[in-house]
Amino acid sequence: MLRLLQIYLLPGAILQSVNVGGGYGTGRELVEFFTRFGMGGGLLGMAVATLCMSLTFALTLALATQFNAYDYRTFFKLLLGRFWFLFEILGVTLFVVVLAVMGAAAGQIIEEELGLPSIIGGIIMLIAVVLLNFFGREWVTRVLASWSVLLYAVFITYFIAVLSNQDTSGADHLFDFSFHSDWLIGGFQYALYNVAGIPIILYAARAIETRAQAITAGLLGGVITMVPALLFHLSFAGAYPEILNQELPVYFMFDGLTVPMLQGFYLLVLFGTFIETGAGNIQGFIERLDTWWRERTGRALHRLQHGAVALVALLLSGTLSSVGIVNLIAEGYGTLAWGYLVIFLLPLFTVGLLRLHRSRKTAPQ
C-alpha cells in the first residue's frame, strides 16, 4: 500500500506542496488569475489550468522515468541539449520571486496577527527551511507529503465553514459562464508558471518504475494540485467583488467567520506552507548541484553545504519581499510565465514526445 502511495500520490502531493505557498495559500494568486474573471469564468480558467498541468506533469514524469532524469539539469539536457542552462536562468529567477512572495506573506501575517515586526516572519521561515534542507531529501519529502494531507483537511474544513456562515444567495449570477479570452489566458498563464515546479520536484518520482505509472501519477498530480484552488475560488463567491482588492484574500474571508480557532489553525498551517514550499524548491536546486558535484568528484555535497545553499537562496530573495505580494504575483509571476512556454512546454511536447516515442526501454509498460 505504501509503495502505491509513493508511486501514484507522492509526486502530486509534493507538487501541491511547492505550489501552495505564498500566493496560492493566501488566495492572492487565485484572485489574480481566476476570481477576477467572475466565478464562472474562474472555473473555466481552472479547468484549462488543470488540464495543462496534468498533461505536462504526466509527460515529464514519463520522460524522467524513461531516462532516469531526477534533477532538472539532467532532464533539460534531454530537451534542450547544450542549451539546458536556459531553464536554469528562468527557473532561478522564478525561484527567487517565489521565495520573496513567501517572505512578504509570512511577514505580513506575523505583523497583522501578532503585532510583531514583519522581519520576524522571514527569520522564522529562514531557520526552518535551512534545517529541513540540512537533513536532506528524505526529510523534505516526508514533511511535504505529510503537510499536504494536513492542508487538505484544513482547506475542506475552511470550505465547509464558509458555506455554513456566509450568505451566497445573491451571488448566483456570478456563475454565469461567459466564453471569452480573458479566463482562457488567465488559466493558461497560471499553468505556465506553476508547471515550472514540475522539473524541480522530480526527486519525488524515484519510486515510479514504468511509463504507465508515470502517466497515471502525472494526471492525478495535476488534479491533486488544483482541488484546493477550486475550494478557495468557490469560497470567494459571497465576498465578490470586495475580495479582488484584498492582499490576503483567505485571511479576509476568515474575518467573516465565527470560528476563531479555525482561523488560528489555518494561519499556522499557512505559515507551514511557506516553509515547505521554500524547502521543496531549494531541494530541487540541491538535487541539481548534487548531480553536478558527483560528476566532478564522485560524491554528493555535504549536509552543511545543503544548508548553506538554502541560507544563501533565502537571503538573496529577502530583498525582493519589500516589493509587496500583489506586485510580485501580478508582475513577477505573470511576466515569467511566458518564458516557460518557450523553454519548457514547447520542447516538452515536441522533443520530449519524440524522444519518448523513440526510446526502447525494456521495463514493462
Image (spheres, rainbow, N blue to C red):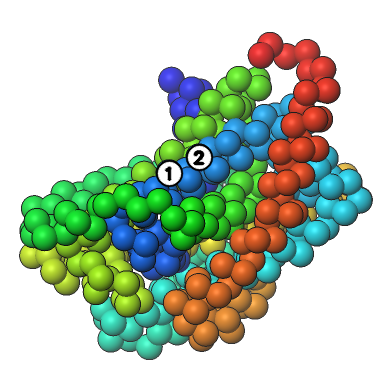
Where residue 40 appears, as percent x and y from the top left, is 31, 52
Count of marks placed on residues: 2
**Marks 1 and 2, how far apart at CA:** 6 Å
Q: Quadrant of the N terminus?
A: top left
Where residue 38 appears, as percent x and y from the top left, is 31, 60
Q: Residue at x 11, y 60 (%)?
A: 170
Q: Residue at x 32, y 72 (%)?
A: 244
Is 180 situated above or below 114? above
Classify mark 2: residues with Cα within 10 Å, few (<14), some (14-19) or many (20+): some
Q: Residue at x 50, y 71 (%)?
A: 329
Q: Quadrant of the C terminus?
A: top right
Answer with the quarter of the image where residue 262 lies. bottom left
Q: Amino acid at mark 1?
A: Ala
> Circle 2 sits in a helix, a strand or a loop, which is it?
helix
Q: Amino acid at mark 2?
A: Leu
Q: Nearer the viewer, residue 349 or 22?
A: 349
On screen, residue 166 versus residue 85, left or right, reads left
Answer with the quarter of the image where residue 205 lies. top right
Please tell me the numbered disc located at residue 51: 2
Please tell me the numbered disc located at residue 337: none
Where residue 50 appears, as percent x and y from the top left, is 47, 43
Q: Does residue 144 appear anywhere in the picture?
A: no
Q: Does residue 102 appear anywhere in the picture?
A: yes
Where residue 86 appears, as percent x and y from the top left, is 80, 59
On screen, residue 1 versus residue 360, left or right, reads left
Classify mark 1: residues with Cα within 10 Å, few (<14), some (14-19) or many (20+): some
The reply to whether callout 1 and callout 2 are in contact (CB within 8 Å) is yes
Answer with the quarter of the image where residue 241 lies. bottom left
On screen, residue 284 versus residue 355, left or right, reads left
Q: Which residue is mark 1?
A: 47
Q: Nearer the viewer, residue 300 or 247?
A: 247
Q: Nearer the viewer, residue 237 or 83?
A: 237
